[in-house]
Image: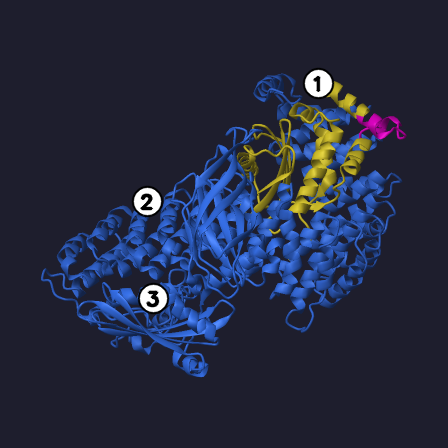
Chain colours: A yellow, B blue
Amino acid sequence: MELCPCVKNILLLDFEGKRVAAKFFCDDWPTNGAKEAFEKAVFNKTQKTNARSEVEVTMLENNIVVYKFVQDLHFFITGGEEENEVILATVLQGFVDAVGLLLRGNVEKREALEYLDLILLCIDEIVDGGIILETDANIIAGKVASHSTVADGLSEQTFSQALATAREHLARSLLK
Amino acid sequence: MAQPLVKKDDDHDDEDYSPFLGIEKGAVLQEVRVFNDPQLDPRRCSQVITKLLYLLNQGDSFSKNEATEVFFSVTKLFQSKDLGLRRMVYLIIKELSPSSDEVIIVTSSLMKDMNSKTDMYRANAIRVLCRITDGTLLTQIERYLKQAIVDKNPVVASAALVSGIHLLQTNPEIVKRWSNEVQEAVQSRAALVQFHALALLQQIRQNDRLAVSKLVTSLTKGTARSPLAQCLLIRYASQVIRESANTQTGDRPFYDFLESCLRHKAEMVVFEAARAITELSGVTNRELTPAITALQLFLSSSKPVLRFAAVRALNKVAMTHPMAVTNCNIDMESLISDQNRSIATLAITTLLKTGNESSVDRLMKQITNFMSDIADEFKIVVVEAIRSLCLKFPLKYRSLMNFLSNILREEGGFDYKKAIVDSIVILIRDIPEAKESGLLQLCEFIEDCEFTYLSTQILHFLGNEGPKTTDPSKYIRYIYNRVHLENATVRAAAVSTLAKFGAMVDALKPQIFVLLRRCVLDSDDEVRDRTTLYLNTLGGDGEVVETDKETKTLLFGALDIPLVNLETSLKNYEPSEEPFDIDSVSKEVKSQPLAEKKAPGKKPTGLGAPLAGPPSTVDAYERLLSTIPEFLDFGKLFKSSAPVELTEAETEYAVNVVKHIFDRHVVFQYNCTNTIPEQLLENVSVIVDLSEADDFAEVLSKPVRSLPYDTPGQTFVAFEKPEGITAVGKFSNTLRFTVKEVDPTTGEAEEDGVEDEYQLEDLEVVAADYMMKVGVSNFRNAWESMGDDFEHVDEYGLGPRENLAEAVSAVINLLGMQPCEGTEVVATNSRSHTCLLSGVFLGNVRVLVRLQFGIDGSRDVAMKLAVRSEDEAVSDTIHEIVSSG
């Protein structure tokens, strides 16, 4: 019996339910079609709810889904039906807050796509193969941000400076 | 911010600004060439990797060749010292999941990173390498991994531990050798390292029960450093409890630890512990109480996740310990209107398990709105809850059956439909009144049923029950339709059902034969065989003969031979002159019981349920009242009446009242529901006029502060009455409240309200309210052991009556006592009758009554009343009740 708390997937969808970033950690959804179908089901089930101030929760296909919406972005974390909802909610809150830090408060689809590398690294730092790595948003964001900056020998940069540089790097380059 | 407008703009802007607009796999694959440049541009390389990751993330897949090409190009990037780029390289390698011959290319680079001075390199290289490696390579890097587990950098240690958890699935023998290092990591000061080490250590030792038990024992003495680790510890502890359940007696190990976790400051730990306690096997009420209290607090939390978690856990408890949950009913009722439908559904199903008869209709109304919003798995739970509710309160079958048939027509999967059908079948079996309507619902369902299994089950059931109804012919059309429209399995079942009607109902025989003959040419063997068999055995040659019992048993009787045995015998039978003899088949059931009659045959104890009902509600009231401090010094609750409706159905405000009787007090509990969505009621109280209830004096009125739409609330009025006197009287009630308009779109109430009143119906307190129905199994014994010390006998004339039965039931109702040994039933036209009653009177005095009735030609009824009780005053009181009633 699996006793360790387990995350089945992390989803970041836009306000139309389209995938911005997604990571599936188990074999429940083997194909991209199955993944998209699940995303669609999750989105449809939750879109009318108001999950802006507090993390909300629902059941879907024998899974627990916790979710929160910020601007036009919908954040989801899925766990098995026996999972402790409060743990999943803590992971989600860490994810949402870390993204907020990395995008410097501009949590929007456009920003998220511009800094997609940060988002993907962020997910990578939260869960590894379903096992929770970290739930503290500051630590998560710190790990992600430091990676993309120290390159220029600025290892002594403060965290916020690091963030700023990271943003500039990518904004300029990806926009052209 | 004007949301819709912004959205439109965003939509438009997105088209312009998305960095990935018009991205094409082919073009990106071309861009990968920059990885091969002698002068690497880290920034540009990172962008290209991001684009590759974007494509993969959106579900694009690379062909084998494309992936290999990308992979080889990516390996070149290890030359760059750029940290950010390296991080992206790690990410893309994990996503590409290279094959084993490709892995070799990066192994040395990754191994170098594993020994780097940069923590980030070490941590990530471990994660990547462990993700893509196979067993042979693992032995090479094992040494480094063991070091990493005890690395002083928590990120590196966690990376190694988590990788260990993954590797344990594929290479358990290697990972098991690390247990010393893991053991050391469990002592780590870093919160998450401890969590990961704990997870790995338990998995390494999971087959060694003693080791796990030791581990838990040593760790539960201190506290874990992170809530996650603490949750894990709780899970291990409950596993140890589970596994030791059979071997140990006395106090449960680790219960104190679980209980102490209920006071942890992290909510996830409190919940984990509460849930663990509720799931202990054979949990006692004493063990359960602190956990329920913790969950109850969560019910009123502002966080939906906590409310959800708590109500879900309580819902499970309600299945096994409904009484333990009734304490939470008030909190639960307020959750019915929770914005989060999942929470509301769970609250409803929990209430269905713990609720009482008066709340059924209200609950059903609320459930109907929810059914379309919730998943099948929840619907099944609701259906099962409703089934048991219906058996508990058979009088409510009509609204429950209605509900079931409505949801049967809606969309749903097999398990859901099966649950509904099973429920209807059980209701039909246990509640005779529900039979005809239930059968018709099933008939309509099979008209449009996509599940063969359900169709055949229903047809079989129809064949058994249909012929016994008053008008069997109305089912024939539904059954015969199946013969035209369905697959062979269903057709065969339909033919059998038709034949059953033919065999059981002689009047239908000619028509049935006509229908059966049309099936003789069916394309399926089984259908034709059955038809021929039935036509021949039932005498289908035109003449209508009564089918004899033997034929019926042959055709429709239960096969009392296990199918497995029959199958074996048939296989062993060799064709010969001697026919197969079914009597030679063993009837002994081997290991497995007959799997045939499962769900529909499962007959729940319909009789047991309603009997269990009343005491449980009394208990619930007692708990409710005990939560109100003002009532505490009234002493022990003697009796609570069934709810009495004070309003007509479908009025603006629905009010019913429960009379609670105490030694020197009476408390009226008014259950009020506001049925107007546009109104919020505040300060709701009931004004009681005592002009026709002289013996009572009002001592206290407890209003409901706020009564939103459709959320029931209770207001109480308490009266004092002289002790030992069966004070009776009539109370006229007026509902008084402040009404505030509510904006239906926002749900916000206006500031100012208007005082208003609403006239309710009158309520009476009668002598029967002071009597509890408590039966005795052997009246004569009880009567004789009571002795005639306080016996009081007298004779009364009851005047002209319709018949004897009416007189008997009038006296029983007047006294409110429990008739014993079925003596409340009067044989028709009998001229005399003896009725035996038993009860407990206020002050816990046992009372027995023997009534002898006689009726003369002019319908005048005379009655001899003999009372025995433990208190002379009570015996006299019973006579007073009769003489003044």
Circle 2 crowding by C-alpha within 10 Å: few under 14, some 14–19, many from 20: few
Q: Residues within 10 Å of mark 3 (few under 14, many from 20)?
A: some
Decide which of B761, A62 is in the foreground and name it: B761
Quick check: marks 3 and 2 in contact, CB under 8 Å? no
Q: Which residue is mark 2?
A: B448
Kindly indicate whether the residue at mark 1 contacts the one at mark 2 (C-beta within 8 angstroms): no
Question: Residue at position x 46%, y 75% from top?
Answer: B872
Percent position of residue B561, x then y: 35, 72
Mark 3: amino acid: Val
Answer whether residue A153 is magenta in the image: yes
Residue B776: horizontal and vertical position, in percent?
Answer: 43, 75
- N-terminal label among 3 and 2: 2
Determine whether B831 is above or below A174 in the image.
Answer: below
Task: Report helix, strand or loop for mark 2.
Answer: loop
* Residues drawn in magenta: A148-163
- Gap in angstroms between the C-alphas marked 3 and 2: 53 Å
Residue at the spot of label 3: B811
Give the vertical position of B774 relative to A104 (above or below). Answer: below
**Callout 1 amino acid:** Leu
- Asked where in the image residue B517 lies, by quadrant, the reply is bottom left
Which residue is drawn at the image coordinates 90% and 30% (left, top)? A156
Identify the residue position indicated by label 1 in the image.
Answer: A175
> Mark 2 — on which chain does it sit?
B
Q: Quadrant of the C terminus of chain B?
A: bottom left
